Each structure stands twice: as C-alpha cells, then as structure tokens.
C-alpha cells in the first residue's frame, strides 16, 4: 500500500527530524574534536547540571556561554578519541535568568557559535557563509537519504550493491557536511545518488584519438564489456550518423549529468573544431556506488566504470585528472609487488585492476590543469571469482559503520549460524579488527600505505569467514622512501607538483604512519566501533582495547626488524599525541575552488592508547 498525501507529509517530517539528529551529532562532535571557535577554551562542564537537565549515567553537561544571559548547553560523554562527544540527539539554548531550555537545530547552533566566536579563528565572512550554505544543503540531502529508509531494513550481506547503498548513507564518517553535493538539484540527487539506486544510461562522446591518452596496459576491448551486443550496434550507428570512424575517434563514456552540465560548456570550442563530437545515443545501464563517480552495471558483471562528475563534495570537485589515473597505475604496481613479497598479503590482499583508463589530453599536455579531469574514464575490474561465485560476499568496510535497529553484523553472524548477542558481536569485531590491523601493518614493512578508509577497503567473506580484503582506488598509495629502499621496492616516480607540498611522498615515519592512524584507525575502525556501540550497546573501551591489542600483535611479528618496530611502537604507543584529520577548519580556511583536492589539515589529540590498561612490550 502506498503512502497517502497525509502520511507522505508525516514521513518527510520524520525524515527531516532524523536528518537533524544525524547532523547535530556530527556537528558538535567535530566542533569539540577540532576545538572549533575555541569551544574547548570557551566551554566548561557544569558542576550542578540537575538545575537544568536530567542526565543519564555517565553523562555530563557542557556549557558554552554566548552572553551574560545566554548559553548553549548539551549532554556529553567521554570518548576514546576525544575528550567529549555529544550524548543523545539534542543541543539546547539556555536562558540563564529563567533556566529555560530551548532545543536548537543544527543551523541555529552553528549560527549562534559563529556569531559569538566565528571571528576569533580568523575565518573570513565568505567562508563562514559558505559553510552555513553547505550545512543547509547537507541537511536537505541527508533528509532525502532518510526517505529511502528501507536501506536499513533487512540489510543483506549477499548483495554488494546494497552494502554500497549503506556505505553511501554515512559517506565520510563524522563529517557534518559530507552529504552536501553542490551542483545537484533534489531531482538530480534522487537520480544519481547511490541511496536511491536509480539506473542511468551512459552518455557518449566521440573524441579524436590524437587527443586521447591511455593507461600503459589499457585494453580498449574491455569497453565492449560495458555494453550488450544491441548497444554496441547502436554505438556504431551513432558514429555512422556523424560520418566519423572508430579508427579516428575514441568512444568516451560520460556521466549523463556531466555531459549536459559540464562538457557542453567546457568543451564547446573542441566541439566546434570536431575534436569532440556528442553522440546521439544513451546506452549502458549503470547505477551509482558509494563513491558517486564509480558506477556498477545494473545487471552485474566484473567491470565497474569510474567517471568524473563536476559537482563539489567535501570542498572539492569530483574530477579525475590524468595524473591521478597515472598515479593509480603506479600505486597498483606497488600493491602487487607487496603481495608478491609478503607471506601474509599473498593470501589476503586482493586488488582491483585499475590500469584500463582513457583521458582527454590537450595539446599543451598540462597534467595539472582541471579541464582534462572532466573528461576521463576508468574501467575497474573486480576479481572474476568474486563476481561469479555466490560463495563470496563483498562488503565495503564503510557499510559496517552504518546501522539503526538492524546491522550487517547481525547478518554476518547469521551466516555463521550464531545468535546475535553482545558477546558474539564483540567477538566478530575482534576477528575483523585483528585481520584488518594485521593487513594494514604488513604494508608498513615495505614503506607503502594504501588509503584504508572504509570506502576503499572491501571485506571478502566466504562461507561466513573473513578471508581477506579487496582494495580499490589506488591513486593515493603513500610511500616512505627509506623503508621502501630497504624492502627493495623501486620509487614509483609519482607525478606531483614540485612547487607545492604533496601527501604521497613522506620523508619521515611520523608523517607516513599518520595515514594509518587517521584513515585506517580513526576513520575506518572507529566508525565501526561507533556504530556497534550505538546498535548493540557495547562498551567503547572494550572494543578500543581490542584495537590496541591487535596493532601491538601485528607490529611484533618477527618480520619487523627491531629498529623499524621501535619506531612504529614509539609513534603509536609512546608518543603523547596522535594526528587527527581536521574536517571543518580546512573548509573554513579554503581559498578558491581547490579543484579536485579536498581541503585538509592535521591536528592533534591525546594518544588514545595511553589511558588504556598498559600492556607488556
């Protein structure tokens, strides 16, 4: 039975409220983590909170004064990674004279803090205004996501694309504006976002082959695998209609939104000169995965297609510059070499093939220009066994960080024929944590570190057992040359700007390990912990201790030389602080569009392992 008009209105109201609760949590946690607007210096724990609010066990009341008569107050709990996180779903405006509380919405909270303290950090009016706009958009689009609430019902590990929908729901964990996709209308969001799983037909552009650059091992025959026999015939007909041949022109698949909203304007001159010719055909049925740019075939298959989309997300355009594709090839070679060398990775590391790519290349050959990054494509090949054999289950780790009443851990336990109990959930996390941290730490031996946040790492499950991890998106495999040299790995010769700092090549172990600490642990593993604690009411400290023990065991493997192990141990266990990726401060300090690079900066937190029970070295 469908929703009536009345029920639809109630449904939309409820989803908007859900979105507000989602957003206020991430917003306040980010403020506290980054000390945004000096909230830690300006705020304090209320000594006698019962005058204002009844708290649950383990909660404290945090107050941030706005004036002599007004304060923002909210309940907080202690957290492993930061001193406090918002507890519950509400933030309040306190009128001190009457002790009256008013529930604040996310935008109200942000505006009040900006008005009171926004200028103390040196943020520009334009950036503060832009941040509020992004927060507004994030709220609207998060509410749209909640409309597809069935993604939380009967979550099934059997469908890879369904787990991609779940992963997309949370997007970048803990980031309040991550859902904001600037450039899409509400209708376009429903059409092209992964939550709604709408099939889309690819657009196509014929590009003169002397303007095409391809990967070193690119196999153009794979493009045929994107289309049915009937669709290939339609593409041939479209070429004939334009009076051009496939020997002279390359058939470039284009995201339908991109063709209409970007290519038509940006490549107008090339179209006039017949360098690029729009083809009157829409063929190839695909649907979005969690990364937006990566599209999966509606009818399944080994090949996914990655295409640029000129919208802004997380402060960057979703481009695919040629240098990223070239660096991805180089990163993939490093991963394959590590797999060959390492006894553990040999059986547990699986790698998507991303060497098949094509890109528009202007005659100036500028690899750092934004324009060519709007017209590229990559075919991502998944191991065929994983696609064709139903014994295998693939689930991105990002999907394991999402859940309401139900959670994929419950489905996973069901595959193992185990009851869903707190003990069984904790034990399953222990297995996942141990395997993942061991997996991640093996790369340290070779001075390389893939980007191990939850969207890039896919857990490979067979018969209910975790057998390894599949990596995709290889364009940011970080390296530490000193350890690479000792492991007899060649410098990949990444394509980077020489006049600006880069994050791919790290000259000291602290910078190098920071990508393990921030992306693998603080974003990926901690997001899963956060979800499990919420759904199954587990104790965060217990799960965090499992993380510490797993990493300790991983780096004490006999393959680590004593000196290397000591360096890693000191950084992870002895140093007083850990790095943390700031989320909002870089957005508030950005200059210009930033192109395809996300605004980023590193802050510090207390070492999260030190307060826990000490273990033997």
Image (cartoon, grey):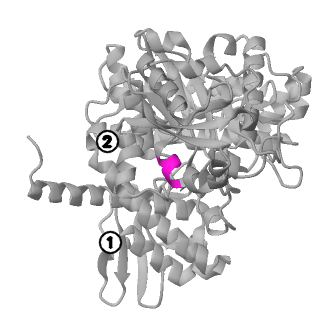
| Residue at numbered disc 1 | 50
Indicate which label's residue lies in the foreground, 1 or 2.
Answer: 2
Instruction: Give the residue displayed 49% in from the left and 36% down from the top.
Output: 398
Q: Which of 259 and 142 is in front in this view?
A: 259
Place of residue 153 in the rendered image (x, y in percent of width and height, measured from the top left): 26, 35
Give the quadrant of residue 192: top left
In the image, residue 413 sits, relative to residue 62, either above or below, namely: above
In the image, residue 328 sits, relative to residue 603, either above or below, namely: above
* Principal secondary structure, stretch drawn in magenta: helix
The answer to whether residue 608 is seen in the rendering is: no
The answer to whether residue 308 is seen in the rendering is: yes
* Magenta stretch holds residue 258: yes
| Residue at numbered disc 2 | 404
In the image, residue 382 sits, relative to residue 109, either above or below, namely: above
Label 1: how many Cα within 10 Å (few below 14, some 14–19, many 20+):
few
Q: Which of 176 and 88 is in front in this view?
A: 176
Boundaries of the magenta span? 257-261
Give the quadrant of residue 610: top right
Gap between marks 1 and 2 measured at Cα:
30 Å
């Amino acid at each position: 039975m469908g929703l009536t008009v009345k029920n639809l209105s109630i449904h939309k109201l409820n989803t908007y409220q859900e979105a507000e609760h989602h957003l206020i949590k991430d917003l306040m946690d980010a403020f506290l983590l980054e000390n945004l607007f000096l909230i830690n210096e300006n705020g304090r724990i209320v000594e006698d909170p019962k005058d204002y609010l009844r708290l649950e066990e383990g909660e404290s009341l945090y107050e941030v004064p706005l004036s002599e008569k007004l304060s923002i107050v909210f309940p907080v709990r202690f957290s492993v990674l930061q001193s406090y996180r918002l507890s519950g779903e509400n933030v309040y405006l306190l009128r001190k004279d009457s002790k009256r509380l008013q529930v604040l919405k996310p935008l109200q909270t942000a505006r009040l803090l900006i008005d009171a303290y926004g200028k103390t950090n040196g943020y520009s009016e334009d950036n503060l205004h832009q941040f509020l706009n992004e927060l507004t958009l994030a709220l609207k689009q998060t509410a749209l996501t909640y409309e597809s609430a069935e993604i939380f019902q009967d979550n099934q590990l059997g469908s890879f694309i369904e787990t991609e929908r779940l992963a997309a729901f949370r997007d970048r964990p803990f980031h309040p504006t991550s859902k904001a996709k600037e450039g899409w209308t509400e209708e376009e969001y429903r059409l092209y976002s992964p939550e709604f799983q709408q099939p889309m037909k690819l657009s196509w552009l014929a590009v003169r082959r002397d303007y095409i650059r391809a990967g070193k091992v690119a196999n153009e025959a794979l493009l045929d695998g994107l289309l049915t026999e009937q669709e290939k015939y339609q593409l041939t007909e479209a070429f004939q209609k334009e009076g051009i041949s496939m020997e002279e022109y390359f058939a470039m698949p284009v995201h339908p939104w991109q063709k209409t909203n970007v290519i038509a304007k940006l490549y107008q001159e090339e179209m006039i000169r017949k360098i690029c010719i729009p083809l009157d055909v829409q063929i190839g049925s695909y649907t979005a995965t969690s990364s937006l740019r990566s599209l999966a075939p509606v009818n399944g298959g080994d090949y996914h297609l990655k295409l640029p989309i000129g919208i802004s997300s997380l402060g960057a355009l979703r481009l695919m510059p040629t240098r990223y594709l070239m660096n991805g090839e180089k990163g993939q070679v490093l991963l394959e070499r590590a797999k060959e060398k390492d006894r553990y990775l040999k059986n547990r590391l699986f790698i998507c093939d991303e060497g098949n790519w094509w890109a528009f290349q202007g005659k100036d050959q500028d690899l750092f220009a934004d324009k060519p990054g709007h017209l590229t494509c990559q075919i991502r090949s998944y191991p065929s066994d994983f696609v064709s054999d139903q014994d295998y289950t693939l689930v991105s780790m990002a999907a394991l960080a999402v859940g309401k009443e139900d959670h994929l851990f419950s489905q996973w336990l069901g595959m193992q024929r185990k009851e869903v109990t707190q003990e069984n959930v904790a034990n399953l996390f222990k297995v996942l944590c141990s395997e993942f941290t061991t997996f991640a730490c093996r790369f340290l031996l070779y001075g390389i570190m893939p980007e191990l946040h939850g969207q890039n790492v896919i857990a490979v499950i067979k018969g209910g057992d975790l057998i390894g991890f599949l990596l995709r998106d290889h364009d940011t495999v970080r390296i530490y040359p000193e350890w690479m040299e000792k492991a007899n790995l060649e410098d990949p010769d990444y394509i980077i700007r020489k006049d600006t700092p880069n994050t791919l090549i790290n000259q000291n172990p602290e910078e190098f390990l920071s990508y393990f600490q921030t992306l693998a642990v603080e974003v990926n593993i901690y997001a899963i912990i956060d979800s499990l604690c919420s759904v199954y009411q587990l104790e965060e400290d217990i799960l965090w201790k499992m993380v510490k023990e797993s990493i300790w065991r991983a780096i004490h493997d006999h393959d680590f030389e004593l000196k290397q192990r000591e360096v890693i141990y000191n950084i992870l266990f002895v140093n007083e602080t850990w790095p943390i990726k700031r989320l909002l401060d870089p957005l508030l300090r950005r200059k210009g569009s930033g192109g395809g690079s996300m605004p980023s900066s590193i802050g510090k937190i207390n070492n999260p392992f030190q307060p826990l029970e000490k273990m033997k070295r």
